[in-house]
Image: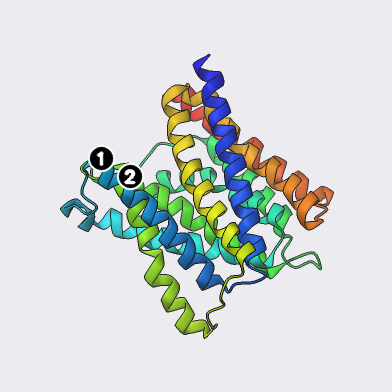
Amino acid sequence: MDNLRGAALMTFAMLGFAIEDMCIKLMSGVLPTWQIVLFLSLGGASIFAALLLRQGTPLFVREMLAWPIHLRNLAEIAASLGFVTALSLSPISTASAILQSAPLLVTMGAALFLGEQVGWRRWSAVVIGFSGVLLILRPGTEAFEPASLFAVISVISLALRDIATRKVPRGVTSLQISFLAFLVLAPTSLILALVTRAPFVPPPPDTWALIAIAVVLGVTGYYAIVAAMRIGDVGFVTPFRYFRLLFALVIGALVFGERPDLLMLAGAALIIGSGLFTFWRERRIR
């Protein structure tokens, strides 16, 4: 029963993230990228700050000065800017499919930088997964969309973020990490505004609604993932992360009229299959 509840929570979180992505893409037609990132940053940081204060936990602790925190924040910045830009300029289904390759990059990064042992089977899965990414991108062909490279930047940054998280001092709680991750995006968005010289656009009422939905679903999805991992068995619950791509495909078709071709779907299948195999092998070895 706990596994089913955990799976339901994970599925709900993925649905929330997919709808959040939809809101960001809709907002991108009205607001510049820096403004979207700023609103998401302030909204998320405010909610996490309120939760920390309610618990009586300080917003900042000395351990936050450790280098893994700084590296994680830099990776978070690159990942957020890259993914918001990718959603703005490329199909939501394409950006979401590329995002699913993050666990494969984490496996590779853990082997290269953390000294974790990765056998030939998982290395083979990583190579196959990256082949799926190439099927989606198709560089050198007419189907290649340069804007999709922002999703690649995002997924590399996400993998770096997750690797850095493994070295975060134990004295820093998950809520504090999340609060800081949202907070550092605010000054970054202002720097981006100066660089791009994109003017501030007063959001119309419907865009404010999209901002609120995106912030609430983003924070709720985070909590749902944490709850899912605590309630259910990790091996049973984790594969349900890939429902995010399924939801993105449906939203892309119904809301944005996207029609992914066979090669794109084949690439997504390779990424998901490789990710599931890699996770299964890690569980079996442990």
Q: Can residue 168 be seen in this view?
A: no
Q: In this view, does 240 lie above or below 213?
A: above
**Residue 129 makes an appearance in the image:** yes
**Percent position (x, y) of residue 2?**
49, 17
In this rendering, position of residue 21 left or right of residue 232: right
Which amino acid is tagged 2? Leu
The secondary structure type at the circle numbered 1 is helix
277 or 47, which lies in front? Answer: 47
Location of mark 1 (residue): 55
At 69% from the left and 64% from the top, the residue drawn is 90
Number of residues whose C-alpha sits closer than 10 Å to that of mark 2, classed few (under 14), some (14–19) or many (20 or more)? some
Give the image location of residue 64, x and y in percent: 23, 54
Determine whether the residue tagged by mark 2 lies in a helix, strand or loop.
Answer: helix
Pointer 2 and pointer 1: residues touching (CB < 8 Å)?
A: yes
Q: How crowded is mark 1: few (under 14 residues within 10 Å), some or many (20 or more)?
A: few
Residue assigned mark 2: 51
Tell me residue 187's x, y (percent).
37, 71
Q: Residue at x 42, y 44 (%)?
A: 111
Q: Which amino acid does label 1 sit on?
A: Gln
Reply above or below: 11 against 254.
Answer: above
Quarter of the image where one finds residue 129: top right
In the rendering, which numbered label is found on residue 244? none
